[in-house]
Amino acid sequence: MINKIVAIQGNHPSKLNPLTDTSVFLANEIQKKKYKIFYYDPKDLSVVNSKVIAKGFFIKFNYKQKKFYKILKKQNLYLTKCKFILIRQDPPFNLEYISTTYILDTIHTKVKIINHPTSIRNISEKLHSSKYQKYMPPTIFTQNMDEIKKFFKKNKKVILKPIHSFSGNNIHLLTKFNSKFIYKFIKKHDHIMCQKFLPRISKGDKRVFIINGRVCGAISRVPKKGSILSNMSKGAKPINIKLTSKEIKISKIIAKDLKKENIFFAGIDFIDQKLNGDINVTSPTGLKTLFELSGKNLAKTFWKELKA
């Protein structure tokens, strides 16, 4: 019998907010089925004598307690003893991130890893959207100043995003071309994403949840007053919504493609019925929030589909 262990590669539980965190929500659900949860940080992954080992701890989650987790036992664990491994750390997509995918690649035939390490390494969360640009607002990916200048001239108000960041960090709205600022931004982030600003972001974006090639649900996140950021970590307020037929159609196309690419769980975002270019495959969030808003438990769907 395979050990009923789920390993989670993620940020330390003390850094998580149980009210909104999807990793905790997924772990809590599978605990009910008598699975043990083993937690480790990406930096604590090693290959020793050709075996993949993680230094971490067994943990129990409990929403009813003020301290929502209890560390049961610290140990080194051969990850091939697990039934599932969930890659749930925050990006950024850096060399540590890439190294962990290479390490996990060596055991992907022995353990089910979500999402597949090769696939998340190949799918850059923002750059991957370049194949769906017909569904997006005008967008370029570049570090060429002439291209950026041309883009500004045409689009007037422009959002600048680093390609490998997360959670709404380092996103700027520029209402005029500022070469000094842009130069510094490129120096720090290399290739960047420039996108025409969509003023309807003030009404919120829509986060769509994709599980195993199916569009399973969505929430909207409305930026706080004076902000353009729809991330809940930046103070946006979640609300329950329905998708339009146009959004459903685009979501289904991407869901089908992601399944072919071996991506089991993803989140995509719309602003004003346009894809905003973030295809979240590392650590999609929002399942707990959807449950609080609608009673729809996609953690159950997640595990049911994964076990199937």
Image: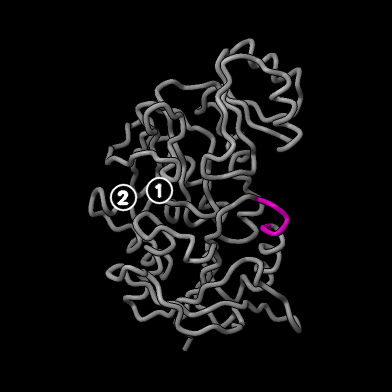
Q: Residue at x 33, y 42 (%)?
A: 219
Q: Is residue 138 left or right of residue 245?
A: right
Disc 2 crowd rating (10 Å Cα; few below 14, some 14-19, many 20+) is many
Which residue does the numbered mark 2 point to in the structure image? 290
Q: Are marks 2 and 1 in contact (CB under 8 Å)?
A: yes
Q: Is residue 130 left or right of residue 293?
A: right
Residue 192 location (% of width, % of height): 67, 33
Question: In the rendered image, which quarter contains the C terminus?
Answer: bottom left
Task: Specify start and end residues of the magenta stretch as a single range.
Answer: 93-97
Q: Residue at x 58, y 20 (%)?
A: 174
- Res. 207 image quadrant: top left
Q: Is residue 277 above or below residue 287?
A: above
Q: How many marks?
A: 2
Q: Is residue 259 above or below residue 274?
A: below
CA gap, disc 2 to disc 1? 10 Å
Residue 248 location (% of width, % of height): 37, 37
Magenta residue check for 96: yes
- Res. 224 image quadrant: top left
Which residue does the numbered mark 1 point to in the structure image? 209
Q: Amino acid at mark 1?
A: Phe
Q: Main secondary structure of the magenta part?
A: helix
- Res. 107 image quadrant: bottom right
Q: Which of pointers 2 and 1 lies earlier in the amino acid sequence?
A: 1
Q: Residue at x 56, y 71 (%)?
A: 40
